[in-house]
Image (cartoon, helix red, strand yellow):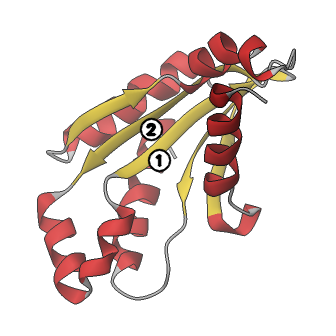
Amino acid sequence: MNRIALSFALMLAATAAPAQDRIVHSTSQSFDDVVFGLENAILDRGLVISATHHVAEMLDRTRADVGSDVVIFDQAEVFSFCSATLSRKVMEADPMNIAFCPYTIFVATTADDPGTTHIGYRSFPDGPMAEVQALLEEISQAAIGD
């Protein structure tokens, strides 16, 4: 296995989460409409998107490098952002809550079902992080108009 493939495999293993560790909502809305709704929902709360990760493009670009011919996503992006107020609150409660920052929400369509758009995020432990999870749920719901 070459170095790129090994690094990628290790990254996937480290970030793989069981289904109960993520919240996913599905809609028949287009990928672009959900992304537009998500960007507006984040900005409407006075938050700033610090990065947009183009996951589908990266996986497609590196597919041959890791020895695969499987197309996973039709489209997939992860949006990173933070709330200074909320981050300070949860990190004052436990400085190790830094592990959850920045907060991310993904939007994706899978190659085998491009007509369904998924939006979601990682779930968080009970306690102070519940407020962050509530924010991510509120933003996700606003993005799809629920």
**Residue at the spot of label 2:** 143
Residue 47 vertical position relative to residue 99 in the rendered view, above or below: above
Circle 2 SS class = helix
Identify which residue, 15 or 109, lies in the foreground.
15
At 70% from the left edge and 52% from the top edge, which residue is drawn? 13
At 71% from the left edge and 40% from the top edge, which residue is drawn? 9
**Residue at the spot of label 1:** 140
71 lies left or right of 90:
right
Mark 1, other Cα within 10 Å: few <14 / some 14–19 / many ≥20: many
87 lies left or right of 21:
left
Residue 92 vertical position relative to residue 79 in the rendered view, above or below: below
At 81% from the left edge and 18% from the top edge, which residue is drawn? 71
Callouts 2 and 1 close, C-beta under 8 Å: yes
73 lies left or right of 102:
right
Q: Position of residue 34 (x, y in %)?
A: 51, 28
How far, Cα to Cα, is label 2 from label 1? 5 Å
The disc placed on residue 40 is: none
Question: Is there any visible trace of residue 28 in the rendered image?
Answer: no
Residue 37 vertical position relative to residue 80 in the rendered view, above or below: above
Q: Position of residue 3 (x, y in %)?
A: 64, 29
- Toward which corner of the image does residue 95 lie, by quadrant? bottom left
Circle 1 SS class = helix
- Toward which corner of the image does residue 93 lie, by quadrant? bottom left
Q: Quadrant of the N terminus?
A: top right
